[in-house]
Amino acid sequence: MDPLPCPGDIIHLNVGGTRFSTSKQTLMWIPDSFFCSLLSGRISSLKDETGAIFIDRDPAAFVPILNFLRTKELDLRGVDINTLRHEAEYYGITPIVKRLDLCEDLERSSCGDVLFHGYLPAPGIPPRPVGVALETECRMRPSASTGSPQYQSSAATPLSRSRYASAGDGAEGGETAMFEVPLDPKKVRIIVGHHSWIAVAYAHFVCCYRVKESTGWQLVFNSEYLEQSVERVALNSKCPGGYSDNKDRMIAVSSGSDIRLWSFQDEGPKNERGVFNLSVQVDDLFFIGSQLVAISHTGKIGVWHAMTHNWQIQDVEPISCYDTAGTFLLLGCNNGSIYYIDMQKFPLRMKDNDLLVTELYHDPNDDMITALSVYLTPKISVSGNWIEIAYGTSSGKVRVIVQHPETVGHGPQLFQTFTVHRSPVCKVMLSEKYLVSVCAEYNHVRTWNVTRFRGMISTQPGSTPLNSFKIISLEDADPHHSYGAGNRIGPFGEQDDEQVFVQKVVPETDKLFVRQSSTGKRVCVIKTVDGSPLSCFCVHECEGSSRMGSRPRRYLFTGHANGSIQMWDLTTALSKVEKDSKDTDGHKSVVGGPTEVELLKLLEQCDISASRCSTPSLSPSTSLVASRLRMVQPEDGQEEQGAAGGAEGGADSSQDPNSKVFRVSLC
């Protein structure tokens, strides 16, 4: 005859308000679990009014765990696997955790999904010369006694201190606490591409890779250790008028106001061609043909020509945006004017050190030009191209102007105006089929269908509204100066093809959302194969192979905190989206950016309550305010709203220098 069970063998539990009864043997058959520690007295317990042990966890998720302890079988019907795994890890039920890990491993591979195209390990870090100090980021915050929110700045950014001076002036007598954080030498900061080459920038060096069909990607160039941290990168893999029969590749980097330029060959030495100074912070660095161009938003342009080796600086109006079209550089300025420079005629027509900056158009309302996009139509006559320009303004207007080839001397004519944005326009793109604009309110996107006749934009029926969506992207309140260059949302792609946005929702993430720029529809979700956080990304179209009929392919390159570069095939992703839309015939629900569930999971990785506003940010980002909107006054009520939001969210963040502050990224 079996002995009767002792009263202590029956355990009564109260899990989140729901009562359960089971045996002590059932709860303790897995060693080193939560229940073994609880019932052995190693951890303290609470009891409710009936004497049942109270556990403050989800009762619904506890049901399958208790059933597994009773039957040693796992029933997943109607169970959220992620929630169950989280609870199983809390209770220490390792058999459940291992089974769920195996289920996830079957769906995921270190080789990535079908879009994963390649992996480049981190290169070796060049040795730091003796006597060169390790560069750090200096971060500052007002003292806790002021109750003001935290502000951060980078010592590598000369303008960063002035960026936040006005924001901190509201707290009288607020002393600033300084602390330094070393720059991570392994983190990839910027990736840029040109033809079949990419340049990858780290904190203190830059390297170049080329791809060949037979051998794949190869490391060709690696700079020495650079004393100042890299903030901008420009690459030219086909330099006309170069040093060695056009076989030279050119790469340039900027740090503050300094620019360094190298030339190198595929199988040859590298040569430093010069160190130049713009005298102010370099905000953009790029090549137009053989010319290296550096731009500062304060109103300076620097140009270096490969034929003459001449470095020329010229002062213009403060620059808020730019675009290139062929050999033309177009500048949108704070005074409401669009200027242009014909680089093909530089320096042949340069006189008295003048770059021949010419005014092309002036906004009728004198609004600041904050975004610019030039579209050159195919040649329709011997006269040349029909030039179309879309631009955005600080008041939120989007205008389209056109230049007839037969009326070169009369200037562009205003074609159409849109007044749908209520915040400054920070990005605009005019392509063959679409007009896309992005404003400062959470990267709000508006798109239009463009009607064309013989390749030229048509007045009948004109542009038709297509879609409206947001590309929300949170980032640190004051990241390194290179962050903006390495994390632009787009749109990316040629103007005669489907363009895409790339959405990085939170700063520390291993996931990107790729979306069509015209509709916002999701193209794919990129998840890193090794789980390392994404630090930057770039969309680039590489040249096709030498075989007849081969076409260029579009890739997404992602840089990571561990120094690696991963590649993803966007050409395949776009073709799959197009095929799926034809197969479903419009009956499939359209998914764009992260769903509510996906967004909540991503936001778990950051603390938006530490934001300086009542929302993560409703005003333009700090970098945009500093460099592009200095002359724009806030509308009535906006300044007060921002101040109130800062007071609301700032009390806690001022206590901890490591607390995260996030804002909306406007690239």
Image (cartoon, grey):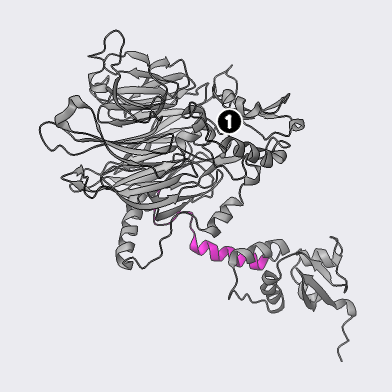
Residue 456, magenta (yes or no): no
Q: Is residue 269 visible?
A: no
Q: Nearer the viewer, residue 12 or 498?
A: 498
x then y, percent, for residue 109? 48, 57
Q: Which residues are magenta?
A: 94-117
Q: Quadrant of the rendered structure where residue 351 is?
A: top left
**Mark 1 residue element:** loop
Q: Amino acid at mark 1?
A: Leu
Q: Is residue 653 visible?
A: yes
Q: Left or right? Give the position of 374 relative to 614.
A: left
Work out which quarter of the rendered image holds the N terminus and state it: bottom right
x then y, percent, for residue 637? 57, 38
Q: Nearer the viewer, residue 580 or 354?
A: 354
x then y, percent, for residue 659? 67, 39
> Residue at the location (66% across, 34% down)?
150
Work out which quarter of the rendered image holds the C terminus and state it: top left
Residue linked to disc 1: 183
> Residue at the location (60% across, 24% down)?
134
x then y, percent, for residue 267? 32, 28
User: Which residue is at the far left?
Assistant: 382
